[in-house]
Image (tube, grey):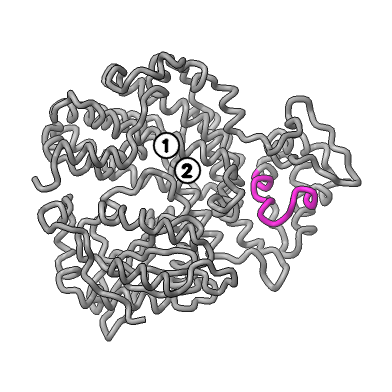
Amino acid sequence: MDEDVLTTLKILIIGESGVGKSSLLLRFTDDTFDPELAATIGVDFKVKTISVDGNKAKLAIWDTAGQERFRTLTPSYYRGAQGVILVYDVTRRDTFVKLDNWLNELETYCTRNDIVNMLVGNKIDKENREVDRNEGLKFARKHSMLFIEASAKTCDGVQCAFEELVEKIIQTPGLWESETQNKGVKLSHREEGHGGGACGGYCSVL
Amino acid sequence: MPIPQPGTREPLAQSVVPVSQGETIFSFTTFLASYLGFATTPQFLEQLLGSTLSSISVTWTHQCTEDFYPPLNIPSLKLKPEPGLIPAPEERPPSVMTLELQLAPEATSVCTETEKSKTKEQLPSVMMFSPKLVAEQLTLKDSELFCKVAPFECLGSIWSQRNKKGKENLAPTVRATISQFNKVAGCVITTCLGDHSMNAQDRAKTMEHWIKVARECLGLGNFSSSHAILSALESFPLHRLRKTWRAVSRKCSKHFKDLCGKDKVLIRDPLIKVGTSKLEKNPQRAQMRLRKQKKGVVPFLGTFLTDLQMLDAAMEEYVDGNVINTKKKMKEVKVLQEMQLLQVAASNYRFQHEQQFQMWFQLLEGLSEKESYHLSCQLEPPSQ
């Protein structure tokens, strides 16, 4: 184990198909993918170590691109996640409209209510924009999410998105320290009396 | 397969042609599944003209009927369709879905209106059918669908287009597989939640039954339905039913845990199960071995879709301007080759349709995700 790594965080990338989730993930990690290697080590996530404010965190980033239509998203997928990146495509309004469904899903499945959510408006390098920045920001505010616009193509904003998310997670007491002992089957905190599905109340500085 | 040299389409096509003259057609069939990523059908076809078209065109028209639709307009060639292979001019190309419906009419013709009017409660319980029978019947359907999957539809550059306007009919063979997968998952959830007269003990028995079915599916090498069943048992509406899970026998709970562990490995590398692996250098040898072994396999298609999507996002289509990125193509071809190997294995099953189960499966109306969640909360309220 890396001695200087503060913690390992589980991050999920979700959103409609074709919004560029896998590109976002690849631009942030090493930009490579090898199906044979993935099969050999049997992983469905990519790992990257990131340094924020002098703290090193190892990120395990999960992405199910290509599988959105399978009825497979189970609590075990969401279990133990500290951060969620919810992606839409600024050139496709339908992907923005569907955000409500994804939030419902998150609220239903997430095992804790202090999980940090970030909204990412992707593909800002394209010209035919259908969702303007303010709409995205407004939606993020309403649902207490961090917000950033990015382009996986030009790498614009990609690093920043992950850094901001990790920073917020590290600043949220109790979200990451206790996670290591928390590996058993655990039913939703929300169900066990914390009530409500509202997130912590942070909003982007952007 | 000879490695295509980096360059434009022409050298790539030429480097593929000699393959068909040799002893194997396997690499060529894989190539057919991937060429749409960088050339149109007329472009590619014209490249092949004057060489060995006759020896391969039969395979091509048989394997990828839809490539020849709408009718091609190539000045140097008159393509004479074999009767029955090329569709009559219509608005859109034939989808395998449509073909499949014609071939397997039980979905529509077997279910008469009177039968459809039966309510969920009137249908017999899934416990009527032994786990072995259920697993075999699911495998029969899954393998049929997987064999029909057109590999090129799984390519990241194609499958990622599925939600775009006007692409609603894209990748019908992939959609058919996904819809069967979801139907199986829905069936598990519905049989555990849909009957109001059941108590926690009954529901636990039904869950145990499905755990046994999942076990049988894994034994049969059907990783698609086993994954569907295990995902359903882990889905939120079922996973949260603590009272019910408490009533599940210790032995079955242990099996369930073991199965979930195996499932994670096997959906990643289904070839392990049939004794070959991705590392097999000679696809023909692997193919021969699979045929001899007579072992069937149905992989979980989602793994291929994710891998191909990631590959597509990780590598550029063109390098240095307009030069096709052959590295990418070779990697894609490798994945498609593995799929085709598995299609050979999927055709090894020899089960017969069992009318009663198939009808039951068709008639079962699955609960929506919302309904399932609602019913689950009725059974065990969230505040408990």
How far apart marks 1 and 2 lie (CA) works out to 10 Å
Using the image, determine if residue B125 lies above or below residue B233.
above
Secondary structure under the numbered disc 1 in the rendered image: helix
Residue depicted at 14% across the width and 35% down the height:
B244
Residue depicted at 60% across the width and 33% down the height:
B96
Q: Are marks 1 and 2 in contact (CB under 8 Å)?
A: yes
Callout 2, which amino acid?
A: Leu
Residue depicted at 31% across the width and 18% down the height:
B123
In front: label 1 or label 2:
1
Q: How many marks?
A: 2
Q: Is residue B140 visible?
A: yes
Residue depicted at 36% across the width and 53% down the height:
A101
Q: Which one is nearer the viewer's eye here, B113 or A150? A: B113
Residue under circle 2? B301
Q: Is residue B334 visible?
A: no
Percent across and percent down for residue B93 are: 68, 38
| Residues drawn in magenta | B30-44
Instruction: Judge left or right: residue A152 versus residue A172.
Output: right
Callout 1, which amino acid?
A: Phe
Q: Residues within 10 Å of mark 1 (few under 14, many from 20)?
A: many
Percent across and percent down for residue B257 are: 23, 41
Q: Which one is nearer the viewer's eye here, B112 or A177? A: B112
Which label sits on residue B181?
1
Using the image, determine if residue B296 lies above or below residue A7.
above
Which of the two discs, 1 and 2, labels the residue nearer the N terminus? Answer: 1
- Considering the whole magenta stretch, tell me its main secondary structure: helix
Q: Which one is nearer the viewer's eye here, A144 or B184? A: A144
